[in-house]
Amino acid sequence: MNIFTTDFFFSIIRIATPILLATLAAVVGEKGGVSNIGLEGIMMMSALFGSLTAYWTKSWFIGLLIAMLVGLLEALLMGFFAFKLKTDIILVGTAVNMIGSGGTIFLVKVITNATMDQSMTSTTSLITKALQIPSVNIPLIKDIPVLGKIISGHSILTYLAFLLVWLTIVLLYKTPLGLNIRSVGENPNAASSVGVSVAKVRYITIGIGGILAGLGGAYMSMYYAMGWSLDMVAGRGFIALAAQSMGGGEPVGSMLAALVFGFAQALGIKVSATGVDSNLVAPIPYIVTIISLVIFAINQRRKDQKRHAASALN
């Protein structure tokens, strides 16, 4: 059976989209010196409220806006605890992830009066085709053999995600705000000494990350899964952190890393469909994650050694 079909490559892009959105959130956060490990929880909460709002308002666009708003508010709340109350941001992120997992179950039961089955996996299957984030068939490109079937027909959030890679580059390297973000991330004391408000920049940084993670959550519940379910984000927030690290903290490199993880997950699904035991297939994305991080660490170590050798010669 041929695994590497146009449908397979189409699914790579489809699966990589929420990972890419969360990865860009991690990139912006890391540049600003904010390690946001709460991306998983933010995506879960945004996924829930985005799908519920779309159902109540009968508008996918309003649902998308609410998902972004929830992501922003949750990220700013994280910032308040970390920057204002001086709570360790790792602990704050862990709490957000726990709320995203357990708190959303409570909210579903309270808001929708839903009953969970014994495995606690019942879903809010409220997103119909009319409420799903629309897909776009790109004129001309859709008619190109092979390539058209891979690139055309994705959700508008998929195309937005790849556009945001370029916009993130512009933000970080072509704007005064981006300069401030990188300055605060590299040396907050030096940035403060020249009049940059470190607290303000950090709030902006974590807020941007929250919006991006909110988009990722909306994609999961309003396009990918057509509804909310328990732990539906399935570790994509953590994979995004790995992709950001593997990509060297740069938008383009992190995008490529997100595609690698999309490839791994798509491969696992495809192989499972051939009849292979799912227990053997499930670890594939995590194995690829570990291997990728090891390769990145080795390459990074070599670069550091060369840099130190060059410094010694000088």
Image: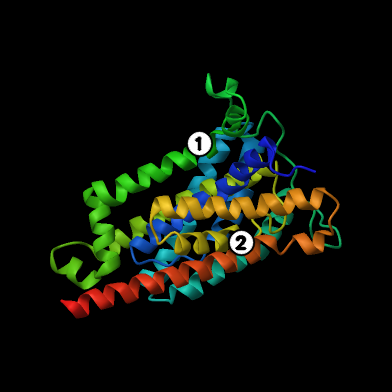
Dot 2 crowding, Cα within 10 Å, few <14, some 14–19, many 20+: many
Task: Say whether residue 50 is left or right of residue 199.
Answer: right
The image quarter containing residue 287 is bottom right
Image x and y of residue 2, in percent: 75, 42
Dot 1 crowding, Cα within 10 Å, few <14, some 14–19, many 20+: some
Marks 2 and 1, the one that precedes in the sequence: 2
Label 1: which residue?
159
Instruction: Give the quadrant of the C terminus.
Output: bottom left
Is residue 100 among the parts visible in the rendering? yes
- Label drawn at residue 100: 2
Is residue 213 among the parts visible in the rendering? no
Image x and y of residue 171, in percent: 31, 47
Identify residue type, mark 2.
Gly
Disc 2/disc 1 C-alpha distance (Å): 26 Å
Quick one: SS at disc 2? helix
Quick one: SS at disc 1? helix
